[in-house]
Image (tube, rainbow, N blue to C red):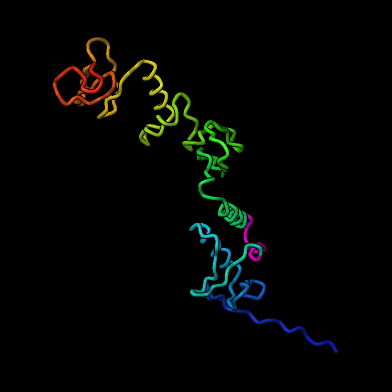
Amino acid sequence: MVEPVKLRPPFVCEICTETKTVQESFSINGCSHTYCTECITMYVASKLQENIINIRCPVPKCISVLEPHDCCPILPTEVFDRWGKALCEAVIVASEKFYCPFKDCSALLINDGKEAVKESECPYCWRLFCAQCKVPWHAGIDCTDFQKLNRDERQREDIMLMELAQNKNWRRCPECGFYVEKSTGCMYMKCRCGIAFCYSCGTVSTSNSHNCSKCGR
């Protein structure tokens, strides 16, 4: 005699509190809590948005952890891939990793520290960047001078202006940053902001003397 198959009854998801079928259930290894696949999918995605990669059971104080391989069958490919990528990045030492500075790329790159690389090419978008400054390549200016620039002065146009100023021997006001050019006369220079300084070395003048207290010019 063939016995009838016993069907498991529906259950109530502990997150959305709605009644779901057994086919929609998801159980976490290590605990007795059961949820619907839709809620677990949204739960994992929300934790990844918060940059949390070690995802625990939603029930407070429960120490069970969700494993990517267990969640793989129910997660969208994009969410699963994002989780796997985040886990891989987490094992890389923070001092060795950085991202392509071009916003439309932002690929993860690794600096193994074996040599001091400056001009480099992103293997994903093939554009040049400075591995020391972590910015698009700043042609015409070395890293030391680039790091001295304010954050709002690091665009390509600003660097081109600085390169032009160097070629023209322009001096920059130490107070307001405005570029000035000496045509004739002594090294005593007074900017439009009112600050007087030495055109030769850039030292601010604290007296009416036209002789620089630092370089003597």
Inspect the magenta stretch and tell me whether residue 108 lies in it.
no
Q: In the image, 146: left or right of 189?
A: right
Toward the left, the furthest residue is: 208
Residue 181 versus residue 82 in the image, above or below: above
Residue that extends furthest to the top in the rendered view of this protein = 184
In this rendered view, identify the residue nearer to me: 201 or 196. 201
What percent of the width, then of the height, locates residue 179? 30, 22
Towards the viewer: 202 or 69: 202
Find residue 151 and report its image quarter: top left
The image quarter containing residue 128 is: top right
- Which corner quadrant holds the N terminus? bottom right
175 relative to 26, above or below: above
As displayed, is residue 11 above or below residue 180? below
Q: Does 155 appear above or below 110?
A: above
Q: Residue furthest bottom?
A: 1
Q: Nearer the viewer, residue 116 or 127?
A: 116
Is 71 inside the magenta-drawn segment?
A: yes
Q: Is residue 202 left or right of residue 45?
A: left
Q: Quadrant of the C terminus?
A: top left
Q: Residue sitting at 76 percent across and 83 percent down?
A: 5
Instruction: State which region is magenta.
Output: 70-77
Q: Main secondary structure of the magenta part?
A: loop
Residue 9 rendering spot, x and y as whole percentages: 65, 82
Position of residue 204 in the picture relative to residue 66 (left or right): left
Relative image position of residue 73 (x, y in whole percent): 67, 63
58 or 147, which lies in front? 147
- Numbered circles on residues, count: 0
Q: Residue 103, percent across and down?
A: 50, 40
